Structures are given as C-alpha cells and as structure tokens.
Image (cartoon, rainbow, N blue to C red):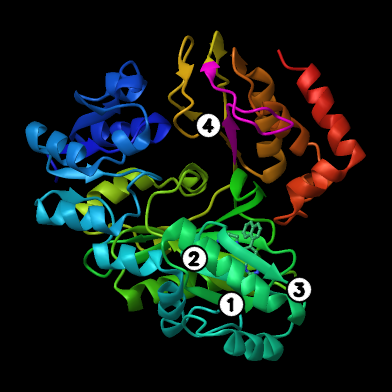
Amino acid sequence: MFKKVLIANRGEIALRIIRACRELGIHTVAVHSTADASALHVRFADEAVCIGSPPSRESYLHVPALLSAAEITQADAIHPGYGFLSENADFAEICKTCKIHFIGPKPEVIRLMGNKVHAREAAKVSGLPLLPGSSGVIKNIEEAEQLAKQIGFPVILKASAGGGGRGMKIVRAPEALSKALATASAEAVAAFGNGDMYLERYVERPRHIEIQIVADEHGNIVHLGERECSVQRRHQKLIEESPSCALSPKLREKMGEVSVKAMREIGYNSLGTIEYLLDEGGEFYFMEMNTRVQVEHPVTEQVTGVDLVKTQLLMSSGQKLKLTQKDVHFRGAALECRVNAEDAVTFAPSPGKITAYSAPGGPGVRVDTAAYENYTVLPYYDSLLAKLIAYGEDRPTTIARMKRALSEYVIRGVRTNIPFHRAALLEEDFVAGRYDTRFVERMQDSELGIQRLKRAIEEMP
Ligand code: MV4
C-alpha cells in the first residue's frame, strides 16, 4: 500500500480523500494556494505545502510546484481528485516519469477518453451502443452534409477536444449546417487549439445516466449501478440520484453488463464512469467516459455501501478487488443536492465570508463539505460549498429527508442555491421521477416554479 499520498486538490474532495487515507493508515500531504492557508484540507492532512498564488494556474494546476511538493515530502502517490489535473494525460505521464504513482488509469487511457472522437471509436469497437453519426473526424462540409441527410435532422456537432457540454452545436436544418460547422470548428480551435468535429443524431429530451465502474489491475471489473444526473443547468449538475426512476432492473443490468464488457475490452483498470444518453424510448447511447472520481460519487456509496475512494486507493496500489458482481446489492435511494455559493435565481457566484453556519444531520443525512463558520468562499475556485446527501429505504423517504435537511441548513454571509433545491423538490415532475435534461429550464419557465423559488428564498432561516 502507499505510505504517503499527496492530494492535488482542495475543498470537500481533498477532505474526502484525506478521510479515506486516514482510515487506510496512509499519511497525507495537502497542497494549497496562499488563499487556502486556513482551509480544512490543510488542517486535516498530516503535512501541508504551499504551492503558489490563488489563481489555479499558479497553484493547483502548477505541475512543477506539485511535483516538487511530492518530492520534498517523499509522497509515493498523487491523488488528483476531480477537476484540476484529474484528467490531464500529460500530468499522469509526468508523474510516471518522476516515479510517483498517479491515482487513476494509465496516461494512454486518459488521453484516449479525452479525445471524444477516439473515445467514440473505442466505445464502438468495445460494443457500446452509439448514436448514428460520423466515424472519425468530419473531413469536409460535403461529408457532413451527406451524413446529416442520411441520419436526418436535427444533428449535433461536437468538438473532439470538448466534452461536458463544451464545443457543441445543434443543427436543425440542412441550410444551417455549413455555417454551424465553420463556426463550431473555429470556436473549438480558439477554446481547445483543435478544431476537429464530429456529428451525431441529436436526441431532444435525453436523460443523463451514468454507470459507475470499479476495475482493478488484475482484470476484475464490477459496476455499481447508475446515477441519474439530468437535473443540470448549463452543464452544471445540480441534483443527482441513485437509482434512476427511468431504469427497470432489466435495463440496469443491461447497461451495467455492456459497460463492464467494454471496460474489459479497453483494459480499463481504475475507477471510472461511463455517461449515457437515455432517450424517451428507453434506448441508451454512449456519450463520454470520465476517468476520475466524480463529484456525485456519494450517492453510489450510499446505495451500495462501497467506499469508492478507499476502493480506488486500494486498487491503484495494485490490490485485488475483493468485490464480485454478485456481492453488489442496491439498497434504498440516495439523492445529492450540490449546495453552491451562488444566487438561487440568477446562479451568479456569491463569494464572501460565511458569517453563520450550521449543518444538517440526523438519520439518512450526509454532508460532504469543507465549509465552516468564518470560512471565506473564494472567487478563484468553483462555487461548490457542500454536497448534501440524503438516503433512505425508498425515494419518498429520501426526498422527505432531503427537504428536512435543506430546511435545517443555515449558511449566512453568502447567497446559496438552497432555495433552488427546495423549490425543485416540490416539482410534481421531480417527485414523480418524470424529468429529463430540460427540467431546470421548464422550472424557470413555469409560473409555479418561479413562485415556489421566491417563497423558498423568503423562508430561508
Ligand atoms: C447530446 C445531446 C443530444 N444528442 N448528444 C451535453 C454534455 C455532453 N457530454 C453531451 N451533451 C449532450 N449531448 C446528442 N447526440 C444532448 C446533450 C445535452 C445534455 C446531456 C446530458 C445532460 C445534460 C445535457 C444538457 C444539454 C445537452
């Protein structure tokens, strides 16, 4: 097992990783920017190293500083968490060169999944269902027009170097295709330094379903079921849950099985998530693969009882997965609300000092956060303040618990999106599990939705 792990991250995920390490008897090194000197991850770790200035580029993304910190503390592994360098193949490669263990899949696999055209091809050859679309990069407008005519409109153009909703363009009519391709490709060059595009049939009202994979370095692979993440706004997830109301036991088994099979084909050997679009007819299609631990991993932990971060550490150090698919049982329902320091109506960030803080608790409630009273939410980093997770024997129990927990949560000094969550949980469509990726839009367009949000803001403690 690793003796000492450096955590190349901050906030709640750094704490989550430190907790897992401590339970496994692994020493921890926190790194931090000058602005994070008093952060909880710094206090919870065994050692801490200041690696630079507040902007991420000069600290949490600064590779030489991170490697120096690992070197001077003699850390034998780096856990990248999510975001920052977690899916940076070059960083994983540099770690390898420096003989520091990168906790994640091999650099080549990170690189493969980061290139969405290559990922799509790899998914196809390993048996994952794809939407009809281009094989490889679109070579010219004639090819795109021919293909779109074959598939039928609407189609979607996606940047090969994009992902997570970046660099996409929906095209609804043949006349619009040529301009859209030129613009999207130019935007991709500007954003990613790579204008490669691909094309797919566009699914109007998809649900976002992702399958959690756990794979060791000895060929053992299991899936831990799904998370539904359809409650998003501008590709920022807001509410996640497991199980999804949209999956029958049969479909769950099918999605799990094909995912495991594909990971076996690819030779995947880490924690991973396969994202799918689920259409209204119950057909699912490969979208992207994430090669990191995800923000929403706790909902899977609560319904399976598997500690994903501990499992990731154990497997990464070469241990065999003790779990077989037969050992995986799903129990009850879990929900996660991402509590962000942002305005509940406009979603504008709201950094500042937390002047009063009291977290919910009691049965079926988990709070993953690095916030505390007098903590300052910094403008340099993302606005995630806490992940509020509720779980219970069934979905109605869990929703009731989440509502209760949201009503207990006191955060003063910064604005939060807690009122948004309270309003969302009152939506009939949410309660019925009848939602898709347009849920937030519909809520914002509905008189009742707006009214509920206003009332939730007034009712804040
Ligand atoms: C799509 C799609 C519809 N059809 N692809 C958004 C994130 C990126 N991973 C891919 N995304 C989408 N790809 C086809 N062929 C709709 C989306 C999409 C979406 C997907 C999941 C969750 C929320 C979304 C919001 C808008 C669009």
Residue type at mark 4?
A: Ser
Alpha carbon separation for disc pair 1 and 4: 33 Å
Look at 34% across and 49% down and name the residue there: 86
Disc ID at residue 199: 1
> Residue 255: x and y, percent?
54, 70
Residue 199 quadrant: bottom right
Residue 392 visible in image: yes
Residue type at mark 3?
A: Arg
> Does dot 1 land on a helix, a strand or a loop?
strand
Residue where numbered disc 2 is placed: 288
Q: Is the magenta region chiefly helix, strand or loop?
A: loop
Tag nearer the camera, 4 or 2: 4
Magenta segment, which residues? Answer: 336-352
Q: Which of marks 4 and 2 is nearer the N terminus?
A: 2
Q: Name the side, left or right, on which 108 lies relative to 417.
A: left
* Circle 2 Cα neighbour tier, 10 Å, few/some/many (<14 / 14–19 / ≥20): many
Disc ID at residue 172: 3
> Residue 247: x and y, percent?
65, 63
**Quarter of the displayed picture in which ligand 1 can be seen:** bottom right
Q: Earlier in the sequence, mark 1 or mark 4?
A: 1
In the image, is the residue at mark 3 within 8 Å of ligand 1 by its beta carbon? no
In the image, is the residue at mark 2 within 8 Å of ligand 1 by its beta carbon? yes
Alpha carbon separation for disc pair 2 and 1: 14 Å
